[in-house]
Amino acid sequence: SPSWSISDEMFFYLLFPFVIFLNKSYKILLFIFFIFLIFILNYKLSDNLKHYWLYISPIIRFSDFLLGILLFDIFERVKKIYAKKESPLIFELFAIFLFIVFFIFHDKIDLGYRYSVYYWIPMSLIILIFSLSKVLYSQNSVSNILSNKYLVWLGEISFCFYLIHLLVIQVMNYIRVKLSLSIDLLLFSIFIFIFTLIASAIAYKFIEKPLNKKVKEYLL
C-alpha cells in the first residue's frame, strides 16, 4: 500500500515541465487555489473520503510539490541576504521545536487538515532553514551533524524502508501467529525494525542504486 506515493510522484514529475515555466505570480495563484480547494473538500467530504482525496490523491497532493517549488524560489532569494555572521543553530532548533509543538497538538486538529495543510509551516521552515545552513555554513549547525556519512546513508535507504516496512510487519506477524509465538510487543517491534533496516539496505544496494544508474545511463 505505500506504493501510492510513487504513483503520486510520477504524476508530479509529468506535470513539472509545465509548472516550472509558469510565472511566479501564477505559481502563487495556483497554490492559493489549492488551499481553497483543500478547505472546501475538508468541509464537504466524509472522513472516509478525506483519506483518499486529501491524503492520497495526486491532484491534491500536487499542492505539496508546488510548495516545494515555491520554497526553492524563496531559498534562492533568501540565501543572498542570509547573514553568515549569525549562527544558524538557533534557527534550526526553533524549526525543530515548532515541529514538535505542531506534533503535540495534532490530535486537536481536524483529520482533513492533518492529511493536508497542517504540517506545511513547520516542515517548510525545516526544509528552508536546514538548506540554508547546509549551503552557507560548514560547522556549528545541526545540518552539519546530519551530514555524517552514516546518517546520510540512512537517509538514502529511507525510501526503501518506507516501501518495505508494511510488508515486513505483515510477514513477521504471520510467522508469529503461525508459530504461536508469545513475544513482548516492544521486542517484536525492535525485531521488525531491524529486519526492515536490513531489507532496506539490501534493496537499496542491489535494486535501487543499480536501476538508478541504468536509467541515468539510458537517459544521458
Image (tube, grey):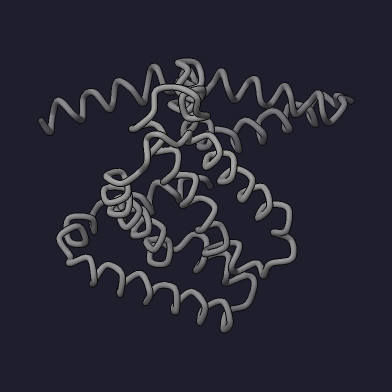
Q: Position of residue 193 (x, y in %)?
A: 66, 26
Residue depicted at x 56% and y 18%: 198
Residue depicted at x 52% and y 78%: 39
In the image, is residue 38 above or below residue 5? Answer: below
Instruction: Name the one closer to the observer, 54 or 84.
Output: 84
Residue depicted at x 38% and y 54%: 8
Of the 4 image quadrants, the one containing the C terminus is top left
Instruction: Name the one closer to the observer, 171 or 60.
Output: 60
Q: Is residue 126 left or right of residue 197?
A: left
In the image, is residue 201 above or below residue 117? Answer: above
Residue projecting furthest to the front:
85
Q: Position of residue 173 (x, y in %)?
A: 73, 32
Instruction: Name the one closer to the observer, 156 or 184.
Output: 156
Q: Is residue 112 left or right of residue 23?
A: right
**Which picture quadrant has residue 102?**
bottom right
In the image, is residue 94 above or below residue 26? Answer: above
In the image, is residue 118 above or below residue 43? Answer: above
Residue depicted at x 61% and y 49%: 99
Q: Is residue 62 left or right of residue 42?
A: left
Residue projecting furthest to the left:
220
Q: Position of residue 202 (x, y in %)?
A: 47, 17
